[in-house]
Image (cartoon, grey):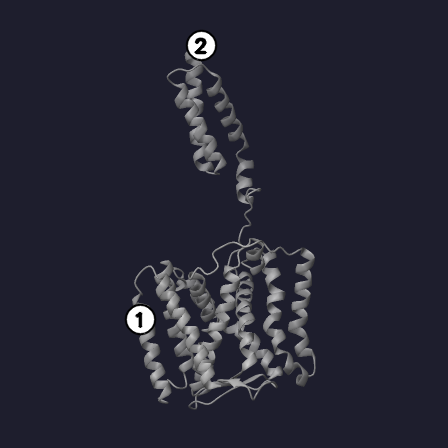
Amino acid sequence: MVKLGVTLFACTIAVLVAEFFRRRTRGYPAYGWIGLGCLAVSQWLMFHGVEPVATFFTPIAWTCYALIADAAVFAIRSRSRIRDTPAQFAKLALLSIPLWLIFEAYNLRLKNWTYGGGIPLSLPVTWLAYAWAFATIWPGIFLTADLVESFGWWQDSFRPIRFTRATQNASMIAGAALVIVPVILPAWLGAYLFAAVWVGFVFLLDPINLRRGLPSFEADLSAGQTGRFLSFLVSGWVCGWLWEFWNYWASQKWNYTFPIMQGEKIFEMPALGYLGFLPFALECFVMYYFAAGILRWEKPLRARTPAQPQPQAATAMLKSWPVLILGLLIAGTAGSRPADASSPSLAESAKNGLQMLYAHATDRVIPEFLECGSRVADLLRNLRN
């Protein structure tokens, strides 16, 4: 099964590399080459059992991969997370630690995996190593999704998929049941139900994110956009193979102990378990935005529909109703007066003022209309004389 795993891993990476060379629009950044070089060296040291690299290989490899993937995204899009929003990326990595500890807490009861091997480490160093490894999980998923999405495989819009409020409520109830039931059942039975945890948070949190105005898959699907949803699914597949391939030869590794398919493993993972990485990537998305929204690290998105103005724009319009009336009066006056040397300029100024108002550029509207008012006054004085 190891040969099969190496073959599937190689095919997955080959597709990514081929698409990168097909889609790139600029040179590969230097920090990506540094990541590639460090990964190659660390893999050589790991395969030869050189410590401490062999023990710390997982966090080393994923740190290198973050540089490689982000650089690839930049070479395609001319923008990327690490280059454009390094502080936000740091928050993603930091939040990755407590988010993964949620699953570690589940594992204390369900006992689906264990850690072992490597050189002896003191407790503080062990904690630091785990924190470093856990801090790479969410960035790995997000950066891979960025890379897949940059390939443009799903640029076309599809028929919107809309969910009623009742459907959303049912989704949240089902999600809550999926994440609660495995831990309230007897431990021997709950051990078979870890898959429910891998999908439960998606059903539970995505509707909540939508209602809070945070990024959500449901909002994307309602707009006919499937790119992000599918990109995260593919990201789960890619990262699953990377995790298991690198873990298999590392000195410090995890071993799966859940009570199914222990005789049909690809690397350390029972074959069926690879399907779990797909919904796990979706969970990474919804859990991050849910937690980041609570911490105010991510701001709610403002809904935009063609038929309705944005709340802020509507407020601006209400506040500027006297200016609107003034503009309409000026425009009407300019259009009804006999043509003279000043009339075209007056009409044009009124027109510009109204266009600014409709565009909600209220800071420029009042001076424009005041200028129009001055011209109206001059026009009336000329007519009276």
Splitting the image into 4 quarters, where does residue 37 fall?
Answer: bottom left
Secondary structure of the residue carrying tag 1 is: helix
Residue 52 makes an appearance in the image: no
Q: How many numbered marks have been drawn onto this rendered protein structure?
A: 2
Label 2 Cα crowd, 10 Å radius (few <14 / some 14-19 / many 20+): few
Q: Which numbered disc, 2 or 1, marks the residue that appears first in the sequence? A: 1
Under mark 1, the amino acid is: Trp
The reply to whether dot 2 and dot 1 touch (C-beta < 8 Å) is no
Q: Nearer the viewer, residue 42 or 86?
A: 42
Q: Is residue 201 left or right of residue 328?
A: right
Q: Nearer the viewer, residue 226 or 73?
A: 226
Evaluate whether residue 206 shows in this view: yes
Q: Quadrant of the C terminus?
A: top left
Quarter of the view holding residue 185: bottom right
Q: Can you give x and y, in whole percent of width and height, for residue 221 in the image?
A: 57, 57
Amino acid type at mark 2? Arg
Query: Height in image: 66 above or below 211?
Result: below
Q: Position of residue 85 (x, y in %)?
A: 40, 60
- Residue projecting furthest to the top: 385
- Mark 2 → mark 1, Cα distance in angstroms: 78 Å
Circle 1 packing at 10 Å, graded few (<14), some (14-19), many (20+), is some
Mark number, residue 33: 1
**Number of the label disc, if any, that sits on residue 243:** none
User: Circle 2 sits on which residue?
Assistant: 384
* Nearer to us: label 2 or label 1: 1
The residue at 39%/15% (across/down) is 340
Disc 2 secondary structure class: helix
Q: Is residue 371 above or below residue 210?
A: above
Residue at position x 68%, y 61% in the image: 169
Residue 161: x, y in percent? 60, 56
Q: Nearer the viewer, residue 176 or 22?
A: 22
